[in-house]
Amino acid sequence: MSKVASTTPRGSHGATAEKAREPREIGQRLVELCKKGKNLEAVEELYDENIVSVEAQAPPEMPATTKGIVAIRGKHDWWYENHEVHGGDAKGPFVNGERFAVFFHYDITPKIGPSKGQRTTMAEVALYTVRDGKIVHEAFFF
């Protein structure tokens, strides 16, 4: 999705002075993209360049806290390289002020670890914080 060029200076979180999207709108777009399997497109469109992501349970290969858009892209690459995703769903957003939650359910087969090769389902809730029209923080709960 291309953005209209603006000569207005950017704010501290990368949003232009144009009307920033509200958390409900951001959440709806995130859910829409995730339902289509376009998770990385959601990152590119909706996340702030200084995003902080916190996992409830990080694998040994990954830190529990990831900072910055480049690191988030790497985290997504790692996930898809190490899991076969058969399907998934996202429900929400459930909005409260500048935050919203999304319930995720995935049908996966891990390619690594103790469950390697065993098809399973996983469910998690993610809590997102929006500032200046971009997601600046996400935390996952199992």
Image (tube, rainbow, N blue to C red):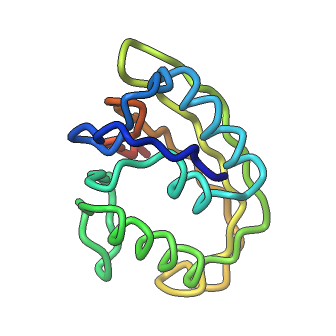
Q: Nearer the viewer, residue 91 or 142?
A: 91
Q: Residue furthest front?
A: 7
Q: Position of residue 92 (x, y in %)?
A: 62, 27
| Up-down relation of residue 99 to residue 140 (above or below) | above
Residue 38 in the figure: left or right of residue 68: right
Picture quadrant where residue 120 is located: bottom right
Give the residue displayed 34% in from the left and 30% down from the top. 132
Q: Nearer the viewer, residue 106 or 40?
A: 40
* Total numbered labels placed on residues in the image: 0
| Up-down relation of residue 111 to residue 71 (above or below) | below
Picture quadrant where residue 109 is located: bottom right
Q: Position of residue 89 (x, y in %)?
A: 72, 45
Give the residue displayed 37% in from the left and 29% down from the top. 17
Give the residue displayed 60% in from the left and 40% down from the top. 30
Residue 53 in the figure: left or right of residue 3: left
Residue 17 in the figure: left or right of residue 12: right
Q: Residue furthest top?
A: 97
Q: Position of residue 110 (x, y in %)?
A: 60, 78
Give the residue displayed 35% in from the left and 62% down from the top. 69
